[in-house]
Structures are given as C-alpha cells and as structure tokens.
Amino acid sequence: MIKIENLYKRYHTHTVSDWILHDINLTIPQNISVGLIGRNGAGKSTLLRLIGGMDSPDKGKITRECSVSWPIGLGGGFQPSMTGRQNVKFVARVHGYQDELDDVIEKVQTFAEIGNYFDEPIRTYSSGMRARLAFGLSLAFDFDVYLSDEATSVGDEHFKKKATAAFKERVGKSSIIIVSHTVAILKDLCDAGVYIEQGRAYWFDDINDALKTYQEAS
Amino acid sequence: MNEIIAKKSQRSSWQVTKSVWWALFVREVLHRTMSDRLGWFWLFFQPIMIILVMVSVRYYIMGNVKSIAGAEFIPWLMVGLITFQMFRETMMRAMGAVEANRQLFSYRQVKPIDPVLVRCFIEGQLNSFILIMFILTGLLIEIYLVPNDTLGALSAWASLWLFGIGCGLILSVSNVIFPETAKVIPVTMMPLFLISGVIFPLNFVPQELIEYLLYNPLLHGIEITRSFFFENYQPIKGVSYSYFYLWLIGLLSVGLMLHIRFEKRLKIL
C-alpha cells in the first residue's frame, strides 16, 4: 500500500514557483494497477518520481508499505559511458542482489534481447534498446509495485506485447503505476486511474472513467 | 521465492548503505581503470611521475638548496609532495563526485554523499599505496623515507586524508550550487601549494610573514606529518596540533551538515 498525505510540490525557477502538485491525498491499495493521466506538464511524472523516492515533497508525506521500484523511464538511471552489463550489475548490487548477480544478468539479457550490445556502452544504444534494458532490469527484481514513465511507449510491437505479458503474469503478486498517453496500454494494464489537473489529483476506481473525464476535459 | 522478497524488502539502513557503497566502489574502480587504454597503469604512473618531475625540477634545475634542520632535502620534499598530492586528489575527486554520478540518484538508495565518500576512500587507498611504493623504492636507492614514528606518521597521514574529505564534502555541495567552484578551486591550488611549505622550506621566511602563513591549516598538517617522518626535524615555530585538528573537525562537520541541508537540491536531475 502506498499512502500519500497532504502532498505539495513545486520547483523554484527564476520566474515560476507555483505549486505543481497541490494537496494530494491518495491511497493506492496493494495489487491495484494505476494509470496516471493528464496533460503535458500536469505533474504526472513529478508524482511518479515522488512515489519512487527520487525526489522529496515540499510538504506532506508518502508512506511506502511495500517494495517500490525506481521510476523506469526513457532517460536516467544509466551511466552512459558504462556497458549495459556493468549498469545491470550496479543496480543489482544497489538492491542487495550481490549473491544473485548471474541470475539477474541472465533474466535481463533474456528479456531485453539486445544481443552483443549488452557489452557496449549505453550511449551507443537506440532509445528502444535503452527502454528494453531498463524494463528488463526492473523485471529482474521482485518489486511489489513497479513505476513506469512512458517506458513502454518507445518500443516496437513485439516489445510492447512482451512487456504487457510480463506484467499480466505478475497480476496478483505485484502491480504497476504507469504514466502514459497510450490509451490501449492504460486500458490493458490498469485497474484504476488518477486524473491530474491543475495540481490536483482525482481518483477513479475504473480506468475507463478516468480516461472519459480526461477526454471530455481536453 | 517469498523468502527472497521478504529478505530484500526488510534490509536495514546500514545494509542498504553497505551495498550502495560496494556497488559504487566497483563502478568507480572499473571506470577509473577501464575507460582509458592502460587505465590501471596511468592510475599509478601519473601521480608518481608528477612527484618525480617536481623533485627533479626543484633539485636539479632550481638547485641552491638550503639545508633543512633535521632532515635530508629530497626525503623532506617527497614527504611534503606526496602528502599534499593525497590531500589535493581526495579533495578534487570528491568535488566532482555528485555531478558525475547524477544519473544514479534515480535509485533512491543512493544518496548524494555516497559517491563522495566512495571516491575519497579510493583516493586514500591509491595514494597510500603510492606512498608505500615510494618508501620501498627509496630503500633501494638510499633515499630514506621510512617514518621514524610509524604510528604517528600513520595518524598524520590519515588526518590529512580526513582533511581532504572535509574539504571535498564542502566543495561537492558548493560545486552543484555554484558551478564556478570547479573553475576557481584549481586556480587556488598553486598558491596553496607554495604557502603550505611543500617545496620551499619556510624556516627562512621572516617572522612577521610566518605569522600570517600560519593561518593556513594545511601548513600545520604537512609540518606535523614531517615531524613524524624525521627524527630530529624541527617544524616551523608556531605549528600547533590543536589548530590543525580544530580545523579538521570543523571542516568535516560543516561538510556533513551541508550534505544534510542540501540533500534535496543535490538530487534534482
């Protein structure tokens, strides 16, 4: 269960310092997959980063009563000058999988299907390859909740199917909180939805209702 | 399987920190040794060459060495150079640590202070190894670098390393908030090098000037180190342990406090 209480967040720049997220109160139950939707810049990714603990709220608090992944996304999380294998090993060590390194590497390799590029520096990867590696890497660990920031949107059909299948396999054991603009993915993976507008978050028990509200608003 | 899940999700803070340090250590060492051709060779060869070049320039080209009370000139020079280099490298590597590992803050287990401490640890190890190399090689060519008081020399060496960590902690924060830090600090290194009595003995500087030079804690630190290496060495008048160690404690405390205060700022991508 993830509990968000009275959460406020803003970023200070020279001209803007409005609240991006304004008094958010949400409880995300165990094993319920949630889609975060809203317009560009509404604060979806910020909320996801806060849930993942990458960033801290200005006010309020987030309680995580389960293991939560890092936000799996397009950028970030990899050291571009290191190879895929070295990055995978690093993340495995950080998560305390020192003794299961080979196991993790094998799982990632099987999922990512990037062949010999696994031993090339990350900077030589295409964005699709990067996403596949990031996704495969997160699946190698047993998280209760996976956070995904558009990670599935760059892949080809084959990868999308594979990713969706991997998540469906885990239904009941773990859930996903996903930021996406792809309606099909949201409908496919999520049970509930959170619609974010003007710094406020609205919870919907059914993702279809959330999508309907979003479409009517835009 | 359930057992593994339980194990991973219930790691204590110390267990998490340990695995983060280990992961960063491996990553850093790999990066240092694998990113260039013969990286591991340059890792040792470069600092050794710098010291040898400095010694030969000072001794053979500038010449005119006044005798130093209680120590041979070349060992005196080498102890100063190696100690100063260890301090400088620890500080400089620490300074860039937060910036260079930015990508890794995606994982909430990694705090901004972790790469700083890991880099300091690596520099300490590396430079201690170089010091031992110099001492052993010195024995063969009769440049006697073996410390007179081994325990004292060890503690002085460790104190200067901690001094580098203190400065590094502060500068690593300052480097993110004021990016100009990385431009200004290297410029100040040369004057600091001169006023810390690393290559010029300060015994002959007039007393009125010494008073001001003694405000520099590094001068105290290097003189203290030398006094442990050479039995009859006379440090400059006014060198004080408590002055140096107060600075040391102050720098470490301020550095750690800055990292607590600015943790959020340092993590923003």
Image: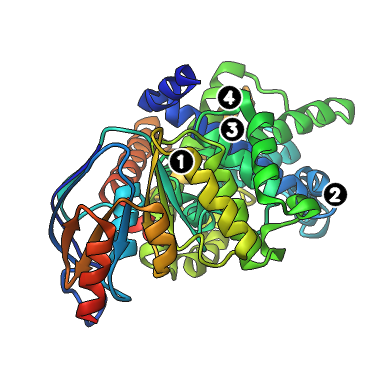
- The mark that comes first in sequence, 1 or 4, is 1
Residue at 59 percent of width and 29 percent of height: B233
Could you say whether the residue bearing mark 1 is in a helix, strand or loop?
helix
Going by the image, does A158 lie left or right of B34?
A: left
User: Looking at the rendered structure, which numbered label has been put on residue B38?
Assistant: 2
CA gap, disc 1 and disc 2: 27 Å
**B59, B52: nearer the viewer:** B52
Mark 4 belongs to chain: B
Instruction: Inspect the image, locate mark 3, and give the three-letter code of the amino acid beneath it.
Output: Arg
Residue at 56 percent of width and 59 percent of height: A160
For disc 1, the marked residue is B114
Mark 3 belongs to chain: B
Task: Respond whether the residues carrying marks 4 and 2 are from the same subunit.
Answer: yes
Residue A38 sits above or below residue B28 on the image: below
Q: Position of residue B227 (x, y in %)?
A: 56, 29
In front: label 1 or label 3: 1
Q: Residues within 10 Å of mark 2 (few under 14, many from 20)?
A: few
